[in-house]
Image: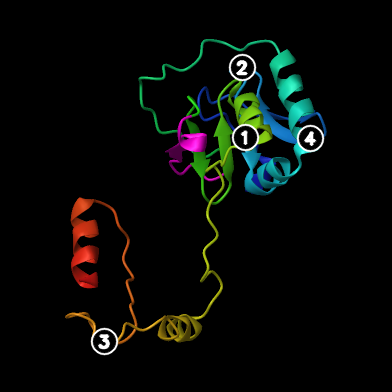
Amino acid sequence: MEDEREKPLECPRCEMPLEARLLADTLVDQCTDCGGVFLDHDVLGALLNDRKRQAPLRERLLKLPKAGPAPNPREVVYLRCPECSTLMTRRNPAHRSGIIVDVCTAHGVWFDDRELAILMQLASAGAELNVLPKPNPLAGVSSKDAAAKRSSLPRMPDKAMGAPQGPIDIDVNIGDLGDLLRVIDRLF
């Protein structure tokens, strides 16, 4: 039986095999057909923290021949992660960058042709990017430790106007407006 990692990663856009390439001291998985690039979170995080590597990578990416036609920005397509095939989330770096990148919170970020160069430009300009997953403060913490952490939350003053007494503990996933309203209702 073939090991899953030995199987080459496939481009989420055109399903062609991704080629591991060293571009300006950065190892990327790139599609030779559409020019897209997949970076795992560790590589991208190191790259975003090392300003000396950003400009050479941006220049190298811009010197590559332009790949086929760019995806239609008005067409919303959710791509699958090259590693695990789950649907990735779409993010707009710096919230107004003009590009949409696709993020697998477990494995990495997909950049269509030239998008990584744009991200490097934003990073070198000091923009606050939102492409890396946020660390889970309770990751690897037992449920007993998590309960202890919640019990150490600040307490509301006992005589607050109708406020609940005891620790403030909101443990919900906000998925829509209804969820948000229920959280607000629990707070007040």
Q: Which amino acid type corresponds to the residue marked 2 in the rendered image?
A: Asp
Q: Which residues are magenta?
A: 83-96
Q: Answer few, some or many: residues within 10 Å of disc 2's Cα (few below 14, many 20 plus, some between 14 and 19).
A: some
Above or below 57: residue 131 = below
Tell which of 152 and 46 is nearer to you.
Answer: 152
Q: Mark 4, mark 3: which one is toward the viewer?
A: 3
Q: Which amino acid type corresponds to the residue marked 3 in the rendered image?
A: Gln
In the rendered structure, the answer to whether residue 114 lies left or right of residue 71 reads right
Q: Mark 1, mark 2: which one is toward the viewer?
A: 1
Q: Secondary structure at mark 2?
A: loop
CA gap between label 4 and label 1 equals: 17 Å
Q: Which residue is mark 4?
A: 53
Q: Mark 4, mark 2: which one is toward the viewer?
A: 4
Q: Which residue is mark 1?
A: 38
Q: Which amino acid type corresponds to the residue marked 4 in the rendered image?
A: Arg
Q: Which residue is mark 2?
A: 33
CA gap between label 4 and label 3 equals: 52 Å
Q: Secondary structure at mark 1?
A: strand
Q: Residue at x 76, y 42 (%)?
A: 50
Q: Which residue is mark 3?
A: 165
Residue 11: in magenta span: no
Q: Mark 1, mark 3: which one is toward the viewer?
A: 3
Q: What percent of the width, then of the height, locates residue 146?
A: 47, 80
Instruction: State the image quarter where residue 141 is shown.
Output: bottom right
Q: Is residue 173 visible?
A: yes
CA gap between label 4 and label 2 equals: 25 Å
CA gap between label 3 and label 2 equals: 61 Å
Q: What percent of the width, then of the height, locates residue 158?
A: 27, 89
